[in-house]
Image (tube, rainbow, N blue to C red):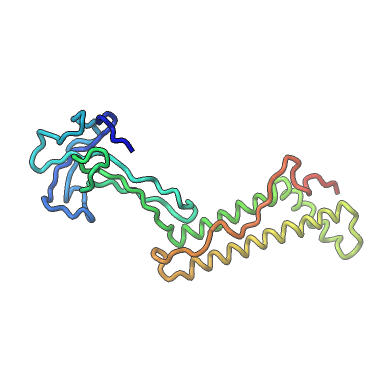
Amino acid sequence: MATPENTIGLYGVTIKWLNRTPNYSDLKPEIDYVIVKSAFACPNYYGDPIQGLAEDEEWLAISSNAYPSDYTPEMYKVETTTLPTNQKHPDFPNYNMYLTKYDRVLRNEAELIESILQIENEANMSIQSESEKAKMAQLAPCIAAKYGNSPLNDPEQAVYNRMIEVGDKVFANAANATQLIAIVKNNADITKTPRLFDIKSGWIYDNITPQGFPLENSVV
């Protein structure tokens, strides 16, 4: 990659070091350093060393690591930290970087369980529309009362079959949620034990079609 010819577009901060021998792996604002001036353009066009700073001051180029792409928000969250570093800017080695880091962090037990229950609800919502749910709630008692006492006619049988189909899929999703929650709860150390499962696996989804669901189009 070619090195830029000038510092146009390069911004930085001036910090004042309170600790002359900082531990870069454990820097603390207001204890190790303070920001004197923030987010202003590099004063040197060609990236030469910054002049005119006090002995305990440093100008650092604002930079950031790549945002993590290999994570699912249901399982992980991203924590952002921005701190001075002693790492040289890749294009302008006269400047250390004021670096923003993005760390992928596993969600805690309660957050993971909430994600699982939310995914279960989304899967179930795909199985049955709200209008079909309303119609099934109205028809189910009628079908149940008649079932076993007299034969169901064809429309009634279609409703019954749809009730069984939906029930089987909802029960399957419930079982998957139970299994995933058990895996989460069985990890002794929720912050350190790696997850050996895919939180999005095992769910049953149905695609909503323009024609709706079978029960929406049935007449009883």
Q: In this view, does 179 lie above or below 82?
A: below
Name the image quarter holding residue 4. top left
- Residue nearer the viewer, 18 or 87: 87
- Mark count: 0
Name the image quarter holding residue 15. top left
Residue furthest to the left in view is 55
Percent x, y of residue 28:
21, 52
Locate the N terminus and report the quarter of the image it occupies.
top left
- Residue nearer the viewer, 214 or 203: 203
Percent x, y of residue 176:
60, 63
- Residue nearer the viewer, 66 or 29: 66
Name the image quarter holding residue 54. top left
Q: In this view, does 66 lie to the left or right of 177?
A: left
Q: Which residue is drawn at 48% across and 70% down?
A: 186
Q: Which residue is drawn at 47% across and 56% down?
A: 75
Q: In this view, does 60 lie to the left or right of 104?
A: left
Q: Which residue is drawn at 43% across and 57% down?
A: 107
Percent x, y of residue 32:
16, 50
